[in-house]
Amino acid sequence: MTTPAGDEGRKDLQDRKVGQETMVGTVPSDGEVARDARNPSIATRERRSTTLTPSGETPYLVVEDLTVKFPTADGVVSAVNGLSYAVPLGRTLAIVGESGSGKSVSSMAVMGLHDRKRTRITGSIRLGGDEIVGLPDSELMKIRGDAVAMVFQDPQSSLHPLYTVGNQISEAYRVHHKVSKDVAKKRALEMLDLVGIPNPIRRFKQYPHEFSGGMRQRAMIAMGLVNDPKLVIADEPTTALDVTVQAQILDLLNNLQKEFGSAIVLITHDLGVVAEMADDVLVMYAGRCVEYGTAEDVLARPRMPYTWGLLESIPTVSAASERLRPIKGLPPSLLALPSGCSFNPRCPYKDRVKGERCITDLPELLPVDGAGAHTSRCHLHDKASIYEAEVAPRLG
Amino acid sequence: MSKTVRPVDATTGGTEPALLQVRDLKMHFPIKEAAGLGRTKKLVQAVDGVNFDLKAGESLGLVGESGCGKSTTGRMITRLLTPTAGQIIFKGTDIAQMKEKDLRPFRRQLQIVFQDPYSSLNPRQTVSNIISTPLRVHNLVKRGKELERVQELLERVGLNPEHHNRYPNEFSGGQRQRIGIARALAVEPEVIIADEPVSALDVSIQAQVMNLMEDLRRDLGIAFVFIAHDLGVVRHFCDRVAVMYLGKIVEQGTRDEIYGAPQHPYTQALLSAAPDLGTIRGVPPKERIRLVGDVPSPIDPPSGCRFRTRCWKAEDICATQEPPLIAQAKSGPGHAAACHFAEPKVDLTAATA
């Protein structure tokens, strides 16, 4: 079991892996199964080229200057403030942030899931060129589940407990396709098989409670992908799962993306998952994007004190056990954001900016090197040298 | 279940007597199932023969996937559950089957911090009331001096002492977890069982709470049993680590042994499955072991080695003979693994340098 050197070796392993996933869960009778059939699959994920949209075509999902506000009895909650991003087909964008940073709210806006009576959404969300902000519900229904699918965090509460899993998947298909029940059933069985659920015919008739957590999440993914969506929004898809199952689900998402070429928006707070899955990363803080770039840029060459703080707070499996350096304080209330940079009350570097700019001016989202796709929202002048000299050594 | 007799002292390094000794601890929950005529009684073997020692001031990590029995073990040690069998020897006294009346002095020594700070604090009680109840129960503070002690404790865990008459809903998740820790500290325990204390918290808050617990361990010399599924957190906090699978400890050793040279296939798979930031910083991608399938049901666990249904090394012997948790060749004295084919694997958590 060595790491394969060439691409061919990798492909081999991937193939073998797909073969194995179909036998997931079958309990082998004692010692009868040949040993190599049960070898653990060994995957090394190859990273895609780091350039954004090499072909220059318009990305599939374009979000521009999105704001989402909720009027409440206590005042207006500004959950998302001027968020812009783009995801081309075949790429994965990870949105990272703490709870309350607006990552789920912004993605629910893309799905059109907010109650329009209680939400104020401005800005633009374009899916394959079509604007969806302000569309009536009847139009949104056609898009939801067809062009865009969502995989939720908790598969236990997002599957209906009183319908069989197969029923729910074929219904999702029949809503968007005028086909007979039999055709839909065939399609559902195909999907269950594709996501690595063993014995799909038996599983089709079962209820969600008869599935384990990992299997349920696979069923959710099968339901999401049944209409071949061009965009999949995965909201913390593995947070409720165990490590070994999480690895299986992440591999599955990766393989399916390779096969169907869909765009994925992955919402997560786990930077380890980001490192393994994402092509691009967007770091959110208090409803704003504070850093945006390729995964290599943001995780290996971060240029924003909040991202530094996040990286310094996680104890990693492979790192030395020095004292953690948490970000002091708490995230701000969305009812009353601090003036200037939202991060300024917690930022240990604000003294290095001349005057009171951090407290008075909101920094623009500017390219870190004068040009290029890597942008960050910070007044600091010498971000690169501060990171190299002070932060990077502490990360080990 | 297990007929294997393990040498009691196999896991005790050194001569210093352990503060807490757990011997062959079992917890079987009966479930009723209507099957055909009459009801057959089945047992969920949540914990099935766990042994470990905890020295004063030490921190032991219990790692494993959900359902492996790590929380149940923690609850038995604090006697929130009465074990089906086995011994929990605290300072020479077996408390496993002790009656509630006799148990009370021990409750003071063994405290627990729960995972979910939203459901483990009574929403109708003020913080001051929550923290002072254990003080009154154990008669630790004179009447009228309670508030003083509460404020001292709040300050110790990094909260504003003036907030003593607020209610839990006025605090954020991280602050609530600090209140839970203050409540456990109130009775000056010698052992704190921390059951996933940081998994419900955001990354930046998680680090704050971890640092707080580290300070407490250093300043007050409290021993910790740290239950977690996050391997990074455990590596950071624990001196020794025990890996559990389906109610049994499959590997036990010092932190460096477990993370540096894991011997049991399950430990190896667990370590390699943890997503890591290393790859992005230019470290070559590590070898990944992907386990297939799910954990088998604890109602009817596999014969022999419980991991064999998902193990790539499994052979005939694994189905018939249960491997004992013993020191393997090529390992240190305190490092034990329960596997017929144990061998160290070193490259799973290559340094991120």
Image (cartoon, helix red, strand yellow):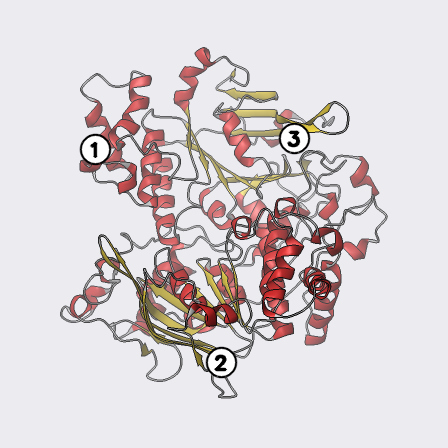
Judging depth in this view, the residue of A195 and B137 nearest the camera is: A195
Check disc 3 and report the residue beneath it: B45
Label 3 marks which chain's residue? Answer: B
Q: Which mark is residue B165?
A: 1
Visible residue check, residue A298:
yes
- Residue B28, compared with residue B327, is above or below; it is above
Check disc 2 and report the residue beneath it: A128
Asked which secondary structure carries label 1, the reply is helix
Indicate the position of residue B177 as horizontal and vertical percent values. Answer: 35, 40
- Residue A186, compared with residue B294, is above or below; it is below
Q: 10 Å neighbourhood of mark 1: few (<14), some, or many (≥20)? A: few
Judging depth in this view, the residue of B145 and A129 nearest the camera is: A129
Separation of disc 3 and disc 1 at Cα? 43 Å
Count of numbered circles on the image: 3
Separation of disc 2 and disc 3 at Cα? 53 Å
Measuring 60% from the left and 29% from the top, which residue is drawn there? B51
Res B15 quadrant in image:
top right
Q: Are discs 2 and 1 located on one and the same chain? A: no
Label 2 marks which chain's residue? Answer: A
Q: 10 Å neighbourhood of mark 3: few (<14), some, or many (≥20)? A: many
Q: Of discs 2 and 3, which sits in the foreground?
A: 2
Judging depth in this view, the residue of B39 and A63 nearest the camera is: B39
Residue type at mark 2: give it. Answer: Gly
Indicate the position of residue B286 as horizontal and vertical percent values. Answer: 60, 62
